Image (spheres, rainbow, N blue to C red):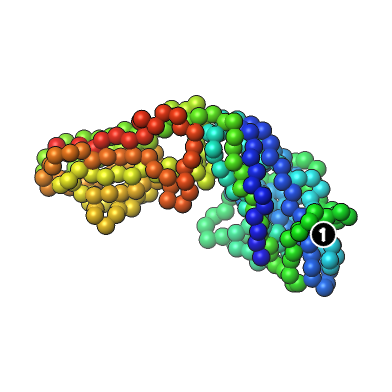
Amino acid sequence: MSRRLEPISVVAGGTARFDLPFTHTGTSPVTGAVLAVGSRHLAKTYRNCSTVGVHLVCTFGTRLEPGAVYGLSEPLAFRPPADSITGSRMGADVTWYTRTGYAAHPIFTPEPGATYVWLAEPPEPRWGTEPQLTLKRLVDPPPDPPETDDPWDEFEEGVDITVTDGRPADLAVSGARTTVTSGPSTVRVRLTNHGPGRLYPDLYTNNDPSLLVTFPGGTTATTDPEGCYRYADLRTLECDGETDFTIPVRVTRPEAGAGRVEIVDHRFDPLELDDPDRSNNSAGIVSG
């Protein structure tokens, strides 16, 4: 079962708070729960919560009674960096587990000293230092809290957070000219952010712009660099995940007219960032 909470807006450098109540609708008590939050830049750490990669993982020993509604002892607080770009978006994805269900999960570790099950060497968890985050039974629960099945192993929810009143970006691309009129060559294209707002691609889902590269007629890509994939016409590539790409090409005959590199939305998320000067969002590519 899953749901999305109401979207939240937060000023860059400010704090967004959200609670995560749920109902245990099973017929039997359940002892213990685990909360995994996929988010960075949470404002506080807790002694019963560890950071594993980009996730905060909290363990609770609370006995959950059938029909009862539970919430956190205090809302989780997300604090975006003060130099975030206006319009930056992130999704804080949240999963509640029973301790049994979480122990079988292949990514995280439920408690200190537990054994990891990873496909690669995992990062070491970093445990918080502030007083424990706890679960409390809500006497006056909010309307329509999410429900869990019996027996429930996991329940997913999340919240979308958008940064307001941040800093503008100045995204720019550099074009290129091949040095040959026939044969193999390379084309280098680059993405630069002149700020003052900063891109956080590991934090925000729309802070990873794509570059759409279209070569002049008579020029085709011969290899896809990492992070790029070719369209069927072989003259067009879309690249993301990096800011600098060197693309092997073959020039058969230089044709009149320049190619183009331009900043476009990431294929999974619209950009929608505050970038007042868009005159430098594209540049030419010339062969020969």
In terms of depth relative to the viewer, which is nearer, 113 or 46?
A: 46
Residue 6, image x, y percentages:
67, 49
**Residue that carries the numbered disc 1 in the rendered image:** 69
Residue 183, image x, y percentages:
13, 45
Seen in the picture, residue 237 relative to 22 is either above or below; the reply is: above
* The quadrant where residue 276 appears: top left
Amino acid type at circle 1 is: Val
Residue 273, image x, y percentages:
49, 37
Query: Position of 281 compared to 114: left or right?
Result: left
SS at badge 1? strand
In terms of depth relative to the viewer, which is nearer, 191 or 57?
A: 191
Query: Position of 224 compared to 48: left or right?
Result: left
Residue 68, image x, y percentages:
84, 62
User: In the rendered view of the protein, which quadrant contains the N terminus?
Assistant: bottom right
Q: Residue at x 87, y 54 (%)?
A: 140
Q: Residue furthest right?
A: 139
Q: Is residue 118 visible?
A: yes
Q: Residue at x 76, y 45 (%)?
A: 75
